[in-house]
Image (tube, grey):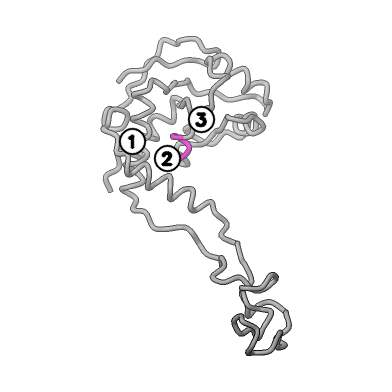
Amino acid sequence: MQVEILNISGKKTTKKVDLTDSIFGAEPNDHSIYLDVKHYLAAQRQGTHKAKERAEIARTTKKLKRQKGTGGARAGSMKSPVFVGGGRAFGPRPRNYDFKLNKKVKQLARISALAYKAKENAITVLEDFTFDAPKTKNYVDLIKNLNLADKKTLLVLGDSNKNVYLSSRNLEGAKVVTASELNTYDIVNAQSLILSEGSVKVLETLLNNKA
């Protein structure tokens, strides 16, 4: 699958890049995408929620009423979950929501997500570039030149570039990552995927690795 490479002005260059069929032309696996997105979102949860149970609150244990003759159940402590202000029964406790997911499944999920973007013609390949200084306007102009101003974009760089990253950081709906940091959630969450020329080779190396 050949794609023309654009420059930061949005103009076509004389160069083209081959997007390997083993990644961008693969048959997507929906379940692997589901698992990897679920794994990513689970890992983002802090899990610091905590409710006090009856043994952890300070309330009187004085007998509230006589044991018999009231027509109601016996009650011997205001800590009981049945009373307002009492401890909570089976409340949330701090926990880790992360779970194990095999590397092969993660790899398949990323390949599947990239294949979907290729099918939707939502991939733009940009020649490698940099900014002289971190400036939000430079990144806004770049997105406008690519006619993607109204879309949620994900720019994938071959190597980290501080100026490009800082230029995009203040923009809603724009994210910049390196190819080695790319995950399935970011691919699926973006409406349009922008690959730098250098990131294509890095992705092919990472995702064609059978080990």
What residue appears at the point 32 percent right and 39 percent down from the top-left corner?
A: 30
Task: Report the side of 65 relative to 129 (left or right).
Answer: right
Q: CA distance from mark 2 to mark 3?
A: 12 Å
Question: Circle 1 — which element?
Answer: helix
Residue type at mark 3?
Answer: Leu
CB atoms at circles 2 and 1 under 8 Å apart? yes
Going from N to C along the chain, the mark reached first, 2 or 1, is 1
Return the x and y of residue 68 as percentages of the image width and height. 63, 89
CB atoms at circles 3 and 1 under 8 Å apart? no
Question: Circle 3 — which element?
Answer: strand
Going from N to C along the chain, the mark reached first, 3 or 1, is 1
Q: CA distance from mark 3 to mark 1?
A: 16 Å
Return the x and y of residue 153 as percentages of the image width and height. 52, 27
Q: Residues within 10 Å of mark 3 (few under 14, many from 20)?
A: many
Q: Which label was assigned to residue 154? A: 3
Which residue corresponds to mark 2?
Answer: 184
Return the x and y of residue 139 as percentages of the image width and height. 62, 23
Residue type at mark 1?
Answer: Ser
Which residue corresponds to mark 1?
Answer: 112
Q: Residues within 10 Å of mark 2 (few under 14, many from 20)?
A: many
In the image, 36 versus 162, the foreground residue is 36
Task: Report the side of 117 relative to 173 (left or right).
Answer: left
